[in-house]
Amino acid sequence: MLARRALPVVTLCRLPRGEHHPVSKPTQLFPSIRVLEQAPCAPPSIYYTPCNRAAFASLSTEVATGVNILKNGTDPALKSDEELPAWLWELAQPEKPLTELQRHEFTELQPEEQRRWVKLETRAGIKANNVLKSA
């Protein structure tokens, strides 16, 4: 007698208007999977889907909508620009591209800029090698 292979059990999410999560139709990818039940469930909150459309519709200028990760917590209030630390505005500055870094001597650069220069130079070399190999 041949041993039967156990098939994985999958629970599908049911969404309104026939919309599905990318993972909610496993039978398309794996026809041997049998679906035992279909239960309503919510998608992860990081995706914009019909299940959490209401959360994104309530964006406001007083509260950081969707930032709360605690089960019983609330979204934090937004602060004015004057209340935010000065280092936060440095994060919004774009990093220097390789051409900008190459205008200076390597020894004149800050340690962070030196690491970035090496990283970008390595990346450019890899891309050049890939172009040569593909031609």
Image: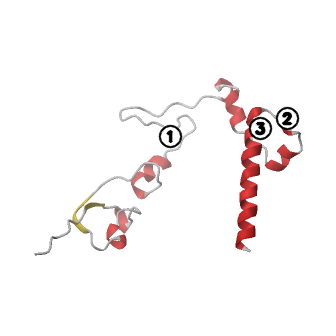
Q: Position of residue 62 (x, y in %)?
A: 55, 34
As shown in the figure, which amino acid type bears the numbered disc 3?
Glu
Q: What secondary structure is marked by label 1?
A: loop
Instruction: Write down the residue under mark 2.
Output: 107
Nearest to the observer: residue 36 or residue 134: 134
Can residue 84 be seen here? The reply is: yes
On the rendered structure, is 110 left or right of 76? right
Quarter of the C terminus within the rendering? bottom right
In the displayed structure, would residue 3 be above or below residue 103? below
On the rendered structure, is 90 left or right of 7? right
Residue drawn at 73 percent across, 39 percent down = 115
Q: Position of residue 120 (x, y in %)?
A: 74, 49
Q: What secondary structure is marked by label 2?
A: helix
On the rendered structure, is 109 left or right of 116? right
* In this view, the mark in front (3 or 1): 3
Residue drawn at 77 percent across, 38 percent down = 114
Figure quadrant of residue 124: bottom right
Instruction: Write down the residue under mark 1.
Output: 65
Residue drawn at 68 percent across, 25 percent down = 82
In the displayed structure, would residue 17 be above or below residue 93? below
Contact? badges 2 and 3 (CB < 8 Å): no
Q: Position of residue 28 (x, y in %)?
A: 35, 73
Q: What secondary structure is marked by label 3?
A: helix
As shown in the figure, which amino acid type bears the numbered disc 2?
Thr
In the displayed structure, would residue 34 be above or below residue 82? below
Nearest to the observer: residue 130 or residue 73: 130
Numbered label attached to residue 126 = none
- The image's colouring method is secondary structure
Pointer 3 or 1: first along the chain: 1
Instruction: Write down the residue under mark 3.
Output: 113
